[in-house]
Image (cartoon, rainbow, N blue to C red):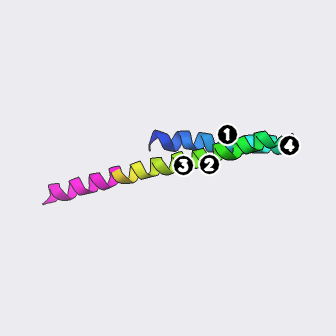
Amino acid sequence: MEKEQITGKVDELKGKLKQGIGKTTDDPKLQAEGIADEAKGALKQAYGNLKDAIKDGDKKAGAEVNDR
């Protein structure tokens, strides 16, 4: 698991929390910040997933070379 996946999830949760508080307090600015944080978190997670996939591909390619 990559650190971007973890920090992305934290940002996503933080964004959801801000959105909820913004809705409750009728604060559109806070809601917008929450939406932005949630999107930032999703992007970080996607980047972390991509890094994981690349590392897994490298490991499999290396194992295939060693098996020959």
- Residues tagged 2 and 1 counted as in contact (Cβ below 8 A): no
Give residue 43's mark: 3
Q: Mark 4: which amino acid?
A: Thr
**Image disc number at residue 39:** 2
- Check residue 49 for magenta coloring: no
Q: How many marks?
A: 4
Task: Give how far apart the Cα atoms at labels 4 and 1 are.
Answer: 15 Å
What is the secondary structure assignment of the residue under circle 4?
Answer: helix
Instruction: Find out whether the residues at labels 2 and 3 contact each other: C-beta distance under 8 Å.
Output: yes
Among numbered discs 3 and 1, the one appearing first in the sequence: 1
Tell me the element at label 2: helix
Identified by mark 2, the residue type is Ala
22 sits left or right of 54 in the view: right
The residue tagged 4 is: 24
Vertical position of residue 62 compared to residue 7: above or below: below
Among numbered discs 3 and 4, the one appearing first in the sequence: 4
- Magenta-highlighted residues: 55-68
Marks 4/1 in contact by CB < 8 Å: the verdict is: no
Which image quadrant: the N terminus?
Answer: top left
How much space separates mark 2 and mark 3, taking CA atoms?
Answer: 6 Å
Q: Which residue is mark 1?
A: 14
Give the CA distance from mark 3 to mark 4: 26 Å
Q: Percent x, y for residue 66?
A: 15, 54
Foreground mark, 4 or 2, reads: 2
Give the image location of residue 22, x and y in percent.
80, 41
Quarter that holds the C terminus? bottom left
Which amino acid, mark 1? Lys
Give percent across and percent down for residue 57: 31, 56
Residue drawn at x 45%, y 51% as measured from the top left: 49
